[in-house]
């Protein structure tokens, strides 16, 4: 006895049924994607409060066959004018780097399938950011110390230049006692102006003289603020 065959479903009915299922699946997928986007937005906002200003990337997957390579990564960087969690797709050829390509998106703008793949790598990204912040801090501290050294050197050069010009101006005016006093005086410059410090009461008298003030103002301008003070000797 021949086996019964299942009734054939007309193609039009199959298409209609599949479309209804796809429509419901699309609604569920969009809702799930929206919730994922909201969760990432919360994380983005938390990172923004830290005002990091540094980038870090973590490779999610990738491969190379000795000639071609590709990789997908999640990172924190600036895309356009906005900082945020980002996705990157990069690929290229080892022998022809001119054809290498890279696409970078903020998380919410990236391909949906790539966003789903990236979620599991967020802890790795946060660890990479922390490491990058530590490394950057050390570099900034070293360069800050170097910048202070350079600033100190510049200030010292400017101080020596001002001293030399003052001595020349005072010598031309015959104010040799003030020239001698200036020779034993420490000069410092700050936002409040120039300070001439001396451990000698006699030199202090010369530094507070009208002749010294006039010579100084001719060199650096009438608006300059300066003080002459006695300094406790060591």
Image (spheres, helix red, strand yellow):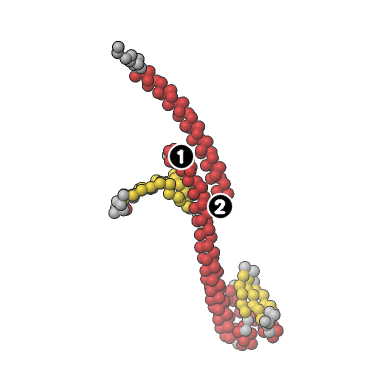
| Image quarter hosting the C terminus | bottom right
Report the residue marked by disc 1: 116
List the residue tagged with mark 2. Answer: 51
- In the image, residue 207 sits, relative to residue 127, either above or below, namely below
Where residue 77 sits: x, y (%)?
48, 50
The residue positioned 40% from the left and 23% from the top of the image is 18
**Is disc 1 placed on a helix, strand or loop?**
helix
32 over 142 or under it: above or below: above
Q: Which residue is at 35% across, 16% downward?
A: 6
Which residue is at 31% across, 49% downward?
65
As measured in the structure, the alpha-carbon distance from the residue carrying label 2 to the one carrying label 1 is 26 Å
Q: Residue furthest front?
A: 1
Res 223 visible: no
Task: Reply above or below: 103 against 141.
Answer: above
For label 2, the SS is loop
Q: Tag on residue 179? A: none
136 left or right of 19 in image: right
Can you give x and y, in whole percent of width and height, for residue 68 in the image? 31, 49
Q: Name which residue lies at 54% across and 68% down.
A: 145
Q: Is residue 165 left or right of residue 86?
A: right
Is residue 198 something that shows in the picture?
Answer: yes
């Amino acid at each position: 006895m021949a086996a019964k065959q299942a009734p054939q479903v007309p193609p039009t009915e199959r298409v209609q049924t599949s479309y209804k299922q796809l429509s419901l699946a699309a609604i569920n997928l969009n809702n799930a994607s929206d919730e994922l986007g909201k969760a990432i937005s919360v994380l983005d906002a938390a990172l923004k409060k830290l005002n990091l200003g540094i980038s870090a990337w973590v490779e999610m997957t990738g491969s190379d066959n000795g000639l071609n390579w590709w990789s997908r990564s999640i990172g924190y960087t600036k895309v356009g004018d906005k900082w945020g969690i980002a996705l990157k797709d990069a690929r290229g050829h080892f022998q022809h780097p001119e054809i290498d390509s890279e696409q970078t998106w903020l998380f919410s703008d990236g391909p949906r399938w790539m966003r789903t793949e990236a979620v599991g790598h967020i802890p790795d990204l946060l660890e990479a950011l922390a490491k990058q912040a530590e490394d950057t801090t050390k570099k900034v501290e070293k360069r800050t110390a170097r910048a202070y050294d350079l600033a100190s050197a510049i200030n010292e050069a400017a101080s020596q230049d001002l001293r030399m010009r003052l001595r020349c101006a005072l010598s031309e005016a015959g104010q040799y006692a003030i020239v001698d006093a200036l020779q034993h005086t420490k000069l410092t410059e700050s936002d409040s102006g120039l300070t001439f410090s001396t451990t000698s009461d006699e030199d202090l008298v010369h530094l507070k003289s009208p002749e010294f003030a006039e010579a100084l103002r001719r060199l650096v301008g009438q608006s300059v603020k300066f003080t002459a003070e006695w300094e406790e000797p060591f």
